[in-house]
Image: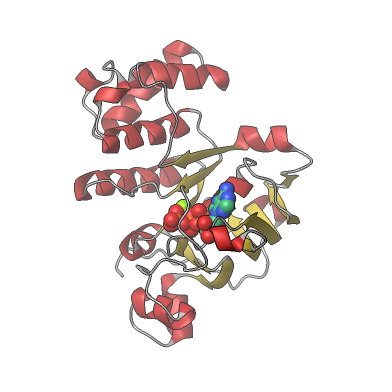
């Protein structure tokens, strides 16, 4: 509980420039995958509205299959919503896709890389796509990789030789390389050991503190949500069922732990997958 950063939110609605992301009633449905469910559609995201303030770390907390990754993919313009509206720093993601793409970066567990190339070569390549000069990518890349606990002697090894956890860190390094204004992190620490988890979490906080970064992350780790997020949004079956600081969530649910708040709001444990369908790849 100690690490919760309180934000004063009783000063009326924020000015437009203070809003990094605004989602209004976003809906995305998929055809169900089971053989008996041919005509069934699942609303992976079922009318979600939320706002992320500039400079905020906002954590989306939800069970497997609750719709977190779909929401992140919609925000990053990888998927198109069936209905609803999303603006990022005032740009509509449908009408101003290019402007939005310059402002955001998304990291997912399934990051795609050139596995035969080294971490550094991948960073340089990614930098080029964003107009970052190779020398600058190398300089920044070295710093970020070392900061994330990847020893310099591994920077030039083929990526396929690095552990999954290390590869995930390289994905994070790649996203930070271009200093995005809004960073979308889909389960940034899933699959990492405790130490790597802590390194990544510390780095995320550092980034927010030192750069003008806004971070929207998903997690199904209660402790991580609590440690990292200024505000938490609880997602269940494609809906945002509650939102607030940890203190607000606890007060509103009249409980003393985030786990109890989650149970009270959703009627199930965080470990229990959303049973709408089989889990889908992130
Ligand atoms: N491309 C797709 N086609 C069909 N169904 C999908 C697709 N993507 C997601 N779904 C379904 O939408 C729902 C939400 O999935 P999503 O991946 O967004 O959940 P999640 O909260 O990210 O879960 P996890 O914690 O496992 O990553 C699930 O029922 C999933 O099976
Ligand atoms: Mg997911």
Residue drawn at the location 35% of the way across and 65% of the way down? 222
Residue 105 position, x and y percent, is: 54, 37
Colour scheme of the rendered structure: secondary structure
Quarter occupied by the N terminus: bottom left
Residue drawn at the location 42% of the way across and 39% of the way down? 110
Q: Judge whether 97 appears above or below 259 on screen.
A: above
Residue drawn at the location 63% of the way across and 48% of the way down? 74
Q: Nearer the viewer, residue 213 or 106?
A: 106
Q: Residue furthest front?
A: 36
Q: Residue furthest bottom?
A: 254
> Residue 174, can we see it?
yes
Q: Judge whether 41 appears above or below 101 on screen.
A: below
Q: Is 234 situated left or right of 92 in this image?
A: left
Q: Quadrant of residue 237?
A: bottom right
Q: Nearer the viewer, residue 221 or 12?
A: 221
Q: Nearer the viewer, residue 80 or 131?
A: 80
Q: Quadrant of residue 141?
A: top left
Residue 157 position, x and y percent, is: 26, 17
Residue 65 position, x and y percent, is: 48, 60
């Amino acid at each position: 509980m100690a690490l919760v950063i309180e934000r004063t939110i009783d000063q009326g609605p924020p000015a437009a420039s203070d809003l990094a992301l605004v989602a209004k009633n976003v809906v995305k449905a998929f055809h169900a995958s089971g053989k008996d469910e041919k005509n069934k559609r699942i609303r992976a995201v079922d009318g979600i509205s939320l706002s992320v303030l500039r400079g905020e770390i906002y954590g989306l907390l939800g069970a497997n299959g609750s719709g977190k990754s779909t929401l992140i993919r919609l925000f990053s313009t990888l998927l198109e919503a069936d209905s609803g509206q999303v603006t990022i720093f005032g740009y509509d993601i449908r009408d101003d896709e290019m402007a939005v793409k310059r402002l955001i970066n998304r990291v997912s567990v399934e990051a795609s890389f050139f596995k035969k190339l080294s971490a550094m070569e991948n960073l340089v390549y990614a930098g080029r796509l964003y107009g970052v000069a190779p020398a600058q990518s190398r300089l920044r890349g070295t710093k970020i990789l070392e900061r994330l606990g990847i020893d310099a002697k591994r920077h030039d090894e083929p990526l396929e030789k690095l552990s999954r956890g290390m590869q995930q860190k390289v994905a994070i390094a790649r996203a930070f390389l271009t200093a995005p204004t809004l960073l979308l992190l889909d389960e940034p620490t899933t699959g990492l050991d405790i130490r790597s988890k802590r390194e990544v979490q510390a780095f995320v906080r550092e980034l927010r503190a030192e750069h003008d970064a806004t971070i929207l992350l998903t997690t199904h780790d209660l402790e991580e949500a609590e440690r990292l997020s200024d505000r938490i949004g609880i997602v269940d079956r494609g809906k945002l069922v509650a939102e607030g600081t940890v203190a607000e969530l606890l007060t509103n649910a009249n409980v003393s732990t985030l786990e109890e708040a989650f149970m009270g709001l959703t009627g199930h444990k965080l470990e229990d997958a959303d049973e709408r369908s089989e889990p889908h790849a992130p």
